[in-house]
Image (tube, coloured by chain):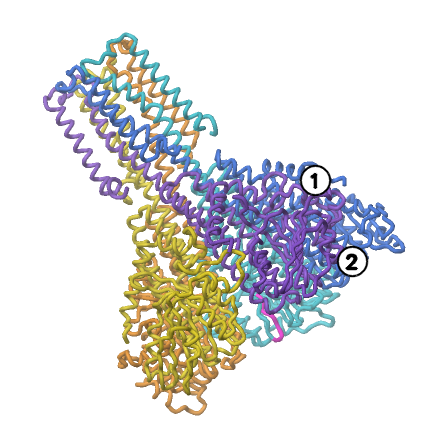
Chain colours: A orange, B yellow, C purple, D blue, E cyan
Amino acid sequence: MKQPLDSAKEVANAAGDAISKTASIFTSKLIGISKGVFSPIATVNEIVKKPAPGTAPGIGHYLDKVDLDLPVRITSIDYGTDFFNQTEFETVDAAMNAPKKEGQKARWINVDGLNPKFVDQVCRHYGVHTLSAEDVLNTYQRPKMEVFDDHILIIVRQIHVQEKKLKNEQISFFLFKDTLISFQEEPGDVFGPVRKRLENPKGRFRNYQADYLFYSLIDCIVDHLFPLLESYGIALEELEEEISHHPVPSCQQRLFSMKRDLALQRRTLWPLREMIDGLYRDESGLIDESLKTFYRDVQDHTMQVIDLLETYRETASGLNDLYQSSVGNKMNEIMKVLTIMASFFIPITFVAGVYGMNFEYIPELGWHYSYYVFLGICLTVSSALAIYFWRKGWIGGDK
Amino acid sequence: MKQPLDSAKEVANAAGDAISKTASIFTSKLIGISKGVFSPIATVNEIVKKPAPGTAPGIGHYLDKVDLDLPVRITSIDYGTDFFNQTEFETVDAAMNAPKKEGQKARWINVDGLNPKFVDQVCRHYGVHTLSAEDVLNTYQRPKMEVFDDHILIIVRQIHVQEKKLKNEQISFFLFKDTLISFQEEPGDVFGPVRKRLENPKGRFRNYQADYLFYSLIDCIVDHLFPLLESYGIALEELEEEISHHPVPSCQQRLFSMKRDLALQRRTLWPLREMIDGLYRDESGLIDESLKTFYRDVQDHTMQVIDLLETYRETASGLNDLYQSSVGNKMNEIMKVLTIMASFFIPITFVAGVYGMNFEYIPELGWHYSYYVFLGICLTVSSALAIYFWRKGWIGGDK
Amino acid sequence: MKQPLDSAKEVANAAGDAISKTASIFTSKLIGISKGVFSPIATVNEIVKKPAPGTAPGIGHYLDKVDLDLPVRITSIDYGTDFFNQTEFETVDAAMNAPKKEGQKARWINVDGLNPKFVDQVCRHYGVHTLSAEDVLNTYQRPKMEVFDDHILIIVRQIHVQEKKLKNEQISFFLFKDTLISFQEEPGDVFGPVRKRLENPKGRFRNYQADYLFYSLIDCIVDHLFPLLESYGIALEELEEEISHHPVPSCQQRLFSMKRDLALQRRTLWPLREMIDGLYRDESGLIDESLKTFYRDVQDHTMQVIDLLETYRETASGLNDLYQSSVGNKMNEIMKVLTIMASFFIPITFVAGVYGMNFEYIPELGWHYSYYVFLGICLTVSSALAIYFWRKGWIGGDK
Amino acid sequence: MKQPLDSAKEVANAAGDAISKTASIFTSKLIGISKGVFSPIATVNEIVKKPAPGTAPGIGHYLDKVDLDLPVRITSIDYGTDFFNQTEFETVDAAMNAPKKEGQKARWINVDGLNPKFVDQVCRHYGVHTLSAEDVLNTYQRPKMEVFDDHILIIVRQIHVQEKKLKNEQISFFLFKDTLISFQEEPGDVFGPVRKRLENPKGRFRNYQADYLFYSLIDCIVDHLFPLLESYGIALEELEEEISHHPVPSCQQRLFSMKRDLALQRRTLWPLREMIDGLYRDESGLIDESLKTFYRDVQDHTMQVIDLLETYRETASGLNDLYQSSVGNKMNEIMKVLTIMASFFIPITFVAGVYGMNFEYIPELGWHYSYYVFLGICLTVSSALAIYFWRKGWIGGDK
Amino acid sequence: MKQPLDSAKEVANAAGDAISKTASIFTSKLIGISKGVFSPIATVNEIVKKPAPGTAPGIGHYLDKVDLDLPVRITSIDYGTDFFNQTEFETVDAAMNAPKKEGQKARWINVDGLNPKFVDQVCRHYGVHTLSAEDVLNTYQRPKMEVFDDHILIIVRQIHVQEKKLKNEQISFFLFKDTLISFQEEPGDVFGPVRKRLENPKGRFRNYQADYLFYSLIDCIVDHLFPLLESYGIALEELEEEISHHPVPSCQQRLFSMKRDLALQRRTLWPLREMIDGLYRDESGLIDESLKTFYRDVQDHTMQVIDLLETYRETASGLNDLYQSSVGNKMNEIMKVLTIMASFFIPITFVAGVYGMNFEYIPELGWHYSYYVFLGICLTVSSALAIYFWRKGWIGGDK
């Protein structure tokens, strides 16, 4: 096992760092309200943009417009019960046309990089709808599943931490009976452990077909949401700590960022759940009945993630109340100090003022002990006030 | 491609300008609570108004009452796989009765301007229900779809930026098997790219019938919502910036306008979504099964728009909390200054007052170093208070 | 057309007046929490009250208890394609038994005033259920529809402005195949235009049966909700104006009344919508299939009213936030004035106090230019504070 | 009619008193969070308690444990079209086994007091499920209906005012074809009028069977909710009055109690509604089809009660806003007074301090008219400030 | 009866203690946002952790990785109408293979401690799915039910108080026709009373099969939620008391913890309810129809718990409002004291200042009664202010 438990923890910590420190930058990118970005959740793909409204549907205009020499990495994995071949190809056509071995269970073609040319090749080879191809290229889709005659198109978002940075990438799958084609935006993904298990000649994995492979990948993606959510949890805990003991205005701002983040994640998670429900109930025959238990398991995990998220949303909203009332309490404390200071000195300052008057006839002025009597009065007034404030709980009582 | 990507950005910016600067005017018009306007979302059509309650249903009374010489522009487009004709007509009757070519795929009659006379001609020619005709003329409908025997009536709102002004216009479509009739309130629409694609002899467009044409127009309208939503996003981002760094009372007011705007848009978008769901599930036979994938794509785009909108609504509500607590924080800061100022000087002012008294016998008065001792006391008291405040974090700690 | 568009505007203005000026009285009546009124929405009918709990169901006990000589006005309208008769009758029995003409399309018997005796006559003549009769007499029903074998009972509320006063009246309809019987609480209704159209020998109206007549009346009632909602809109706009520019405590109170009003209207509108849905889906055969398009039109109007209402509710809730933060801003402004005044004078008052002390030895006292130096210090301190406050934006910056 | 309309009003007033004066006691009892009470809505039944977790289901353990000599009152009413017998029995067995008369329509056995022994007798006699028996004895059930082969179990709560105290009692009904058995916690109920109507030989009541009798009782219970809700309305109106004109902290507390009360009632009313829906749709054959109209009527009443309740909840929430902003307004007023007082006197006090200084050379001191000039300055400064505050609307404008 | 009613009360009190005193620790554990814990509701199981994302599904990797000598306690209970055998076994295999007696009704194998080896034995013996086995080992599942061909997997959480500490433990059941296997995390459970009842030769329990045994255990778990909820109720009552009479900032914090707790419990209770609904509607044949009444009873209890919980949530939210306005009221009180103190002394201090001026010519200075007139003025001003404040209700009126 090369990916030990500790690494999961590290991932969580790194993600927590990423979120708590750069929340507002992160979210403003996520929400996509910076100039020129149309979609709520999109890593800005510099090459392929949402086409102008009114453009012909399908990928035709991409083929005309975009430089088709974009570098991509095409990896094809063939496996059967007793073999495992991983090959790199130059074109998707080559990968698709490669001869199949006897006893081959499934072929998984993974494409890193969204080159319209290669998407088009898949379309022409398998008769995939041109709109499906466009969805693959437009990297701002809601998680969704579309069932066609001989394949299913599934689009999800893969959120993971790579080189200390949060990556939020769209992955599209075409699931055929014996082939799985996946398109990723960039190299680097969360599927390492799955590849490891495929290589392992002893595992049961190689006895299954493309539908099980696909389940393994989806499961992998969903399980990677736990460390992410975990890091939100950590950030919330820190916020709670800070709001409870040292509420500063920046708390409110971070809380706002956090709430926006959670709202955004929620928008991706609910369609994800619907999509997985769709897979579980799928009747296209592409997913074997015996695997439904596995898909139900992914469903369960998604619900756990959503439960966590909703709990965090409620917690964040509670923290807002906590902060609001901490502001009020702080104000009360400030006002108490002012009121106490003013109340102690204002009356006796007046008395001092009285005997500072220059009236010719003020009887007390000439009396020898006046000064001491005056000091006595000051003391009495102050003591009376002190008792009054103490009774009200403004001094001593509750700090 | 005459409508490059940059123009989309420009549109977004212009819309953002329009919204953030004139939000309250815009919204007060949108909400229709200015005198004499009945509907929540209506560009005030000066000619055709909602009839008084109790008036006979249908368009009969429009024909009696309204000046029927209203100028309109009637354009008819006939196309087949190998031809494309665009003609202007004087009357709708003429347009409808024009002979059809062999191999003609569809005819699209577009009417700019709501002249009851021409709507009536369509009614009589095709047997359209008089209430449908009335809906076309009353420009305050919710987006909706009504299925009849041989046609579908679809009413949507087209929101776009024209000459730096936001236009919110009602468009009604009558979709027949081989004919599409559209009524717009004014000249100028978002369908330019569709017309371009029709003119292009190489595109696949001309192989399709009226149902595909209709899909292209609806797709165009939905895609134009993205720049609009985008501009709300930009305005929200500016508001966040301002509330975070320089919250002024006008922020709250703009936020209020923004929230009202978003609430209004929401009221149009949800019925729009329902309508498109209806088209997708349509069983009238007017929309070919093979096109359902296209309608599902529009559905997806609508859901993306709604997701964006709901996210913005949550963000706006979070900004409200942010503003409220920034008001509280500002108050705290003001009070801190007052409290610090008052606390520093009130005690020592009292001491100064004491030695300003005119009692004949105050022993300290005659002592040579009294003045310096007094200054020392002032310094001590002030220092003690300074330490107290510093410990509380009122000075230095968090500015 | 005797009821021009202007009158609709007048109605809206009058209603607006009525609402904004007398909101709290209006609402406290509406909500029915004044002593002795049981129902949320009831014009206090002085004669017929909700019976005590445990009374036998049906109208039996009304017949025993209530003075049956209550004045009512019974009008019967018979019409066919080529005739129109309006007659007043002494009793409902007489109206129901009047002979029918050949070619008669429908008979509409309208009863103004809820005399149990006449309701009972309808019961006995047509076999109407005694509970239906009781519902007619108890003027606090939710809008509802009940389908029986040969008739439908529909109860709605008619809200209109009569002689500058808002009237909220219950109307009950019994719709038979060829007869429509309506019971109103008082003379005066919104059906004038319908009667006009019936009288018009040229209109198509007389070709239709009772189901179309009933549609026309319901349509009339729903359309009268627009001016009412409009007047809420105007009142909200005025409130917004006031809260934005001159927020006084009474705003909050009017807002509270407004929100309660809107909540109440909402309670009537949603069941109204359900009821009209019921009519649209009705399968009793009493409403002709060909009229369903008309009922769908009423449905649409109801949804528009509800949309408006929900938008107003959200607006009112936004105004609440606006008011709350305007209160906070006002406080901030007050505190700023206090803090600035105090901060300017407190330090220099202390200095003045110092040199008012009577110590024998204060070196500065004897120096000739002391006074001018003192004035210079005052100026310097004040300027420094002025700059500090200006930098904080408390003076000059944002007023 | 022995129960005139006035008594209903009296009941409402008494209940209003009970609620507004003792809200917090009442609610803390209702909510059942006082020590040792498990259920949210329970009159503390001192004899029969919720059994410990893990106890065997059914009433077996009650029979072992509880003193079975608890006094109960068993009344049996037999009636037919032409007779009415009310008898008291010692045991339920005796009541159940009493011979039936010819032409007997129904038998109603009412048991006041929950003695497990008698519940057990019913079980054994009619084959009632032991869990039903347990539900009868555990007095903290949600309103519910359970359909068995030959009977229906219905559990509701009867809320009424008895001897100026609010009673909230559980009633369980076993409805058989010809027998109705009801168990109440204590003597005293709201069924007086029903019994009166049964005694009346002229009424139609005696022609009906047990299902109509049961309807009458349920109707009676639902109708008794109106005065209760009414009294909440009155209490809310008083609160509104007080919050508008003289907001004191205790308002907020009473509002809190009120909201908790309403939340609790809501928890009972929604299941009640579901239960009555169940009765309306019942298909067991125990409720005659011809009576369904009556059950629909009860349904309507329940919805009216729920509408009232929901309106009150919204009103209470609006009152909360009203109170919050009244606290803010009060603060503003206090601060205005302070700021005005301080601003008027702080500057001129400084001037006075200046001329109280003991500098040897202050030129103005020796000038003859200095004093009058000083007074003039004071007047000018004060006037200027007065104009400033008046312009801001702090004095005079809106008091 | 060894578990008397008092113990239930004690349990409630202990739980109440546990919650109110250590709420924040408790909840931070519950919510699982401390480092390294992934799940919202989990007692940290030190041995078996959630596997890293991408690990092969099923329990294979547990068998490789975990020390399989974990101590567990395996107890098997066999019973029939006339016998009851409780045996401890070393391995689950031994327990499963033990011969059955004649007339045996059911076998219940309970395993305390999650040793993958024994879970695996059950899998292999009964053909249980490997994912079910994994769910048993991963102690952070939502309550759920999964139906397989010959068994049902049910996972619930058992919340109880053991040795004054709240325990929140996952229990998994495999229900076969004649066998029930349960896995608990640790020794110690709430099933004592059930075992007692099984031992009792006279009870009816032994006549039932595994489905009734399972019902008894679930019932036991649900009934143990009442004391827990009760303790929340007590803690809320204490909070209300404190907020009403002595609101301190820590109240808000405890309220926040409480709300988070309730939100968390809600997340477990709703799926629990769904699960029990599933059992009630179950059609696998594993649960006898005659037992459905029992499952409906558990359903009822769950709904009662949820009702309580939702009521507490509303109450907590109301307490938040109460606290917020108590903060505002406190501020008002503080400001009133300051304003009154300042207003009384500021004007007369000015007057004293005036006559402390050193102008050579101030006529009043030489007048003999000036001092007494001055004192009179002070008294008059103070009295006027006192009356003003008293009228405003700031002194005397409402303290």
Left or right of C391? Residue C229 is right
Check disc 2: other Cα within 10 Å, few if <14, some if 14-19, many if 20+: many
Using the image as rendered, state which of residue E394 and residue B183 is in the foreground: B183
Q: Secondary structure at mark 1?
A: helix
Query: Of circles 1 and 2, which is in front?
Result: 1
Tell which subunit mark 2 falls on. Answer: D
Q: Nearer the viewer, residue A393 or E211?
A: A393
- The answer to which quarter of the image holds residue B339 is top left
Q: Which residue is mark 2?
A: D176
Residue B83: x percent and y percent? 36, 85
Which amino acid type corresponds to the residue marked 2 in the rendered image?
Answer: Phe
Q: Which mark is residue D5?
A: 1
The span shown in magenta is: E149-154
Chain hosting mark 1: D
In the displayed structure image, the side of residue B289 where residue B320 appears, left or right: left
Q: Between residues E84 and A325, which one lies in front from this camera angle?
A: A325
Q: Is residue D229 above or below residue E380?
A: below
Residue C269 among those drawn in magenta: no
What SS does tag 2 mark?
loop
Measuring from the top left, give residue E196's x and y in whole percent: 68, 58
Residue at 21% across, 18% down: D372
Q: Is residue D32 visible?
A: yes
Q: On screen, C116 above or below A16?
A: above
Residue at 34 percent across and 76 percent down: it is: B195
Image quarter hosting the C terminus of chain D: top left
